Image (cartoon, rainbow, N blue to C red):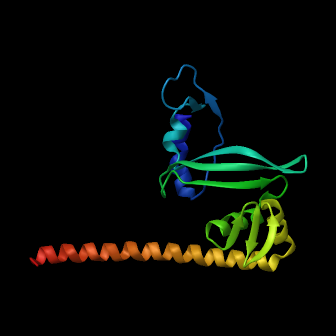
Amino acid sequence: MSQALRKITGNIKNANCLVIFINQIRMKIGVMFGSPETTTGGNALKFYASVRLDIRRTGAVKEGDEVVGSETRVKIVKNKVSPPFRQAEFQILYGKGIYRNGEIIDLGVSQGLVEKSGAWYAYQGNKIGQGKANAAKYLAENPAIGAEIEKQIREKLLKAGAGAEASKAAAADASADDVADAEAGY
């Protein structure tokens, strides 16, 4: 594995492409400290990878007694291109993919746009469903409301991201001014 990765790394960069390796977890026997989990194939993949994701199924999504999807958690284990150790949880429905309306409900609650009291979800004072599945079904039946909530979520998140970038730029400018003042003897 190490020799192959050494040979193809340059070609991957020159071709400007993405290579995805899917691996499995094995348990190490007799480990007293640290994680007993390890991936097969040695350490070459761990070393050469720019991004490593730990994807786990945390539960099942059911409609009645029938399992229609999985609750999934993705953790960034290693990231050379942006901040590591972030985490995301979402639902994947079989045959459909990531459950968009469920994500809108979750993000709406986290951003304060959708109110949650007990099992009930409400948007602008109107109850939209008891339980996440019913609230998401309401958004599927009323796509205009789903689009409105999504637009507000995007505006809030983009504004927060732009504010953080502006504060970083202001801090960098202030520190540059402090350095210039110190050099000038102020």
Q: Residue at x 66, y 35 (%)?
A: 24
Q: Nearer the viewer, residue 28 or 137?
A: 137
Q: Is residue 37 above or below residue 19?
A: above
Considering the image in quadrants, where does the N terminus appear?
Answer: top right
Q: Position of residue 81 (x, y in %)?
A: 48, 57
Q: Nearer the viewer, residue 144 or 80?
A: 144
Q: Is residue 106 left or right of residue 79?
A: right
Total labels drawn:
0
Q: Residue at x 78, y 57 (%)?
A: 97
Q: Residue at x 16, y 77 (%)?
A: 181
Query: From this viewpoint, which residue is outermost toward the left?
Result: 185
Q: Nearer the viewer, residue 129 or 42?
A: 129
The part of the image, by quadrant, that contains residue 130 is bottom right
Q: Position of residue 139 (x, y in %)?
A: 81, 71
Q: Is residue 119 above or below residue 160?
A: above
Q: Is residue 151 above or below residue 77?
A: below
Q: Position of residue 20 (x, y in %)?
A: 63, 48
Q: Residue at x 84, y 70 (%)?
A: 138
Q: Is residue 73 left or right of residue 180?
A: right
Query: From this viewpoint, which residue is outermost toward the top?
Result: 30
Q: Position of residue 118 (x, y in %)?
A: 73, 60
Query: From this viewpoint, which residue is outermost toward the front?
Result: 118
Considering the image in quadrants, where does the C terminus appear?
Answer: bottom left
Query: From this viewpoint, which residue is outermost toward the right?
Result: 65
Q: Is residue 176 left or right of residue 48?
A: left
Q: Is residue 109 above or below residue 162?
A: above
